Image (cartoon, rainbow, N blue to C red):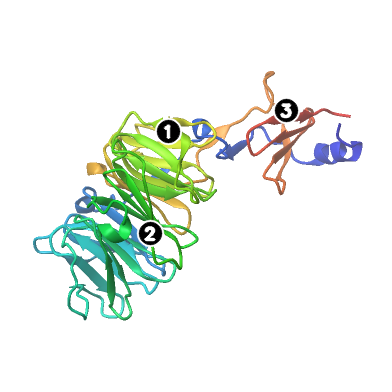
């Protein structure tokens, strides 16, 4: 029941005919996302976007096969190009330098101070590292971690340019066999996680000098990792397998899920939805449902993401998800969803005029009507009606 004075107050407010609101992300199956196609005005930037990163100033950087671009929110500037190599990885350090991996020439660095792309070489000799860079990440102390196809990982100090290289015997002294490192991840706590195509996972805690290792099986050809809100690590395999790994024990958390498509990228948004890039477009997983839900899109809209193979997913500082997919270019969307829908609070015919709307601290949506009392929609979508007095 609602108090009489509240009911009288609602009656004095100007009536509304219908309520439209941006769908709250209570579940992937009921969420609509509005996408925006980036760089559509330049056809040369539409296809073959391979990697995305954001520097501390907020600029978004991306690579095509041999070119590096910077996007300031308004226009794209092509800043550098390779003559023969291709870019294989991209990340930004805390000073705003861009680090890029290549397929045959090792590391390249775009220094913020010089605004030039140059090959990176350490000052000391004896640096044994393959030229094919497969993954990059920056830890909480600002050190760059680079992985190579030869199963080696380097920890690089961008300031002193000194590097420490870890080989198979450093990653796992009990079974020092070379692996194909395909994914690097820095967690919120600063731990470094390493994934391989052979199903081996390595982890080095912040402040530690040794690695922990676990073999989750040869059928786990890991290609992507992402940290969950609870601190577990999502691992995705090329064959569609998906599961979480406990941060403490490195054990897989059941159940193991299986996508019907090849997984190419993972990112978890602030609402806890796991975005999954596949060779058939993007899917979303809510951990509590254990279901892969396709994104509901409008096929007639030129801004909708393609069902092409997703090259990469990226979550920027503002909460936008960036999707780079095949020849379809790059699309972005807010993780809070921005599509508007019509809502009838009760399933019994036309809705009474809406008089007032507010959101409480717990995220509930409260709607006051002229003749139908008060309706509450919880953050999870549950409805409750409080009748007239």
The reply to whether the C-beta atoms of the residues labelled 3 and 2 are less than 8 Å apart is no
Q: Nearer the viewer, mark 3 or mark 1?
A: 1
Residue 129 visible within the image: yes
Tell me the residue that label 2 is attached to.
211
Alpha carbon distance from label 3 to label 2: 63 Å
Identify the residue at image location x=22%, y=47%: 47
Secondary structure of the residue carrying numbered label 3 = loop
Question: Is residue 383 shown left or right of residue 177?
Answer: right
Residue 62 visible within the image: no
Tell me the residue that label 1 is attached to.
256
Q: Nearer the viewer, residue 363 or 260?
A: 260
Q: Residue furthest top?
A: 348
**Quarter assignment of residue 123:** bottom left
Tell me the residue that label 3 is attached to.
352
Secondary structure of the residue carrying numbered label 1 = strand
Q: Residue 341 at what x, y percent from top left?
A: 55, 33
Question: Is residue 121 shown left or right of residue 143?
Answer: left
Identify the residue at image location x=20%, y=55%: 149
């Amino acid at each position: 029941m609602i108090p009489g004075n509240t009911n009288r107050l609602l009656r004095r407010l100007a009536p509304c005919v219908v309520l439209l609101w941006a769908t709250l992300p209570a579940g992937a199956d009921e969420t609509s996302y509005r996408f925006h196609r980036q760089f559509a005005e330049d056809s040369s930037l539409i296809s073959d976007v391979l990697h995305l990163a954001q520097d501390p100033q907020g600029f978004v950087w991306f690579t095509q096969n041999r070119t590096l671009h910077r996007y300031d929110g308004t226009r794209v500037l092509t800043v550098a190009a390779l003559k023969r190599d291709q870019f294989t990885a991209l990340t930004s350090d805390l000073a705003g330098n861009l680090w890029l991996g290549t397929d045959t020439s090792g590391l390249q660095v775009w220094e913020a101070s010089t605004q030039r792309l140059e090959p990176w070489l350490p000052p000391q000799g004896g640096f044994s590292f393959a030229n094919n860079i497969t993954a990059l990440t920056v830890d909480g102390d600002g050190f760059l971690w680079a992985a190579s196809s030869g199963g080696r990982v380097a920890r690089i100090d961008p300031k002193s340019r000194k590097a420490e290289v870890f080989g198979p015997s450093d990653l796992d002294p009990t079974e020092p066999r070379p692996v194909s490192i395909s994914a690097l991840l820095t967690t919120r706590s600063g731990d470094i996680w390493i994934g391989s195509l052979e199903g081996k996972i390595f982890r080095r805690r912040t402040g530690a000098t040794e690695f922990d290792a676990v073999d989750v099986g040869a059928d786990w050809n890991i290609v992507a990792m992402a940290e969950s809100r609870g601190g577990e690590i999502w691992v995705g395999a090329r064959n569609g397998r998906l599961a979480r790994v406990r941060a403490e024990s490195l054990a897989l958390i059941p159940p193991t899920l299986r996508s019907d498509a090849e997984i190419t990228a993972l990112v978890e948004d602030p609402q806890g939805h796991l975005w999954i890039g596949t060779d058939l477009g993007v899917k979303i997983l809510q951990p509590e449902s254990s279901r892969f839900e396709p994104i509901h899109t409008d096929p007639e809209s030129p801004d909708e993401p393609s069902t092409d193979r997703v090259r990469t997913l990226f979550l920027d500082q503002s909460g936008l998800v960036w999707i780079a997919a095949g020849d379809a270019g790059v699309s972005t969307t807010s993780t809070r969803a921005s599509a508007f829908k019509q809502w009838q609070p009760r399933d019994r015919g036309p809705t009474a005029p809406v008089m007032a709307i507010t959101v409480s601290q717990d995220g509930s949506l409260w709607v006051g009507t002229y003749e139908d009392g008060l309706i509450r929609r919880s953050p999870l979508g549950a409805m409750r009606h409080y009748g007239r007095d």
